[in-house]
Amino acid sequence: MSYLGVRCSTVTYNTILDGYGKAGMFEEMEDVLADMIEDGESLPDVFTFNSIIGSYGNGGEIRKMESWYNRFQLMGVEPDITTFNVLILSFGRAGMYKKMSSVMDYMEKRFFSPTVVTYNIVIETFGKAGRIEKMEDVFRKMKYRGVKPNSITYCSVVNAYSRAGLVGKIDSVLRQVVNSDVVLDTVFFNCIINAYGEAGDLATMKELYMQMEERKCKPDKITFATMVKTYAAHGIFDAVRELEKQMISTCESSGKKRLMG
């Protein structure tokens, strides 16, 4: 492009920055950003902002992320909801829960309403860390604020309860989901089938598998693999063989549809 005299636009720079960031090539990323700033015409925008701090956040470079967060604002580039989600996710991965919560507080002061994505990040972070009470507080706050949980929210909560061995609370989540208008997808069913399988509740696991058919939600390889593993662990090999037949049949049916499509 340079050889042909084609100038880089902000979109071009952002694409290159994102590529270097995802590859963890931070030095090259900063060199391109310096060129972008020096260019004077294609100035950094909020997408540049989010790409840079997201790259450092994903790489665990929290100090760099915070430094660039401040520097972009000095350049006159203001954060948006995606920026705050990136910060929350990065602080959560680093186990910096106080900073994660402080971002949420800052958002409220600046009149940025947390979205379902924001809440899902926090719920999953606390759930994975085994901080069940904090997760539940955020989950309640989410519903109180009128932000509707989705399939991802419920999966995170179920996974957290499953890891903590709180099967009774999984029952409560399942009742909430059934009484809501949440569209249940294969990912959710895989999550909850695995939870009951891990708990040794084979009857509920089988019932949920049947519900998938009733809701026209097709099982996938993960569904079958989860159930086969559970039945095999309990020595119920007739069920294993039956599931393996169903899995082959489902895969063949899907293959034919792809060929016809």
Image: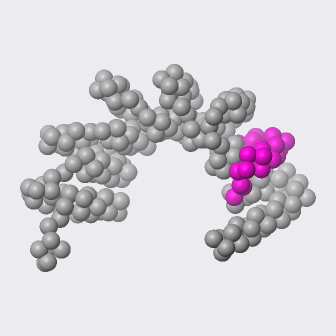
- The quarter holding residue 188 reads top right
Residue at image point 54% right, 28% down: 139
Q: Please say if 134 is above or below 7.
A: above
Residue at x 32%, y 63% (from the top left corner) = 19
User: Looking at the image, is 56 positioned above or below residue 204?
Assistant: below
Residue 100 horizontal side relative to residue 137, left or right:
left
The answer to which quarter of the image holds residue 241 is bottom right
In screen coordinates, is 38 left or right of 160?
left
Say if residue 169 shows up in the picture: no
The foreground one among 197 and 256 is 256
Residue 213, percent from left and from top: 77, 50
Q: Which of the pair 54/79 is nearer the observer?
A: 79
Bounds of the magenta span? Answer: 194-220
Residue in the image at 73% along x and 50% along y: 216
- Quarter of the picture holding the N terminus: bottom left
Label the magenta part by its dominant secondary structure: helix
Residue 124 image point, x, y percent: 52, 39
Q: Is residue 216 magenta?
A: yes
Judge left or right: residue 73 versus residue 251: left
Is residue 115 covered in magenta?
Answer: no
Please identify the residue farthest to the right as the structure is shown. 238
Quarter of the figure with residue 36:
bottom left
Residue 259 appears at what percent x and percent y?
66, 75
Point out the image quarter for the C terminus.
bottom right
Q: Residue at x 34, y 30 (%)?
A: 112
> Of all residues shown, which one is farthest toward the bottom?
3
Look at the picture and state if 113 lies above or below 74.
Answer: above
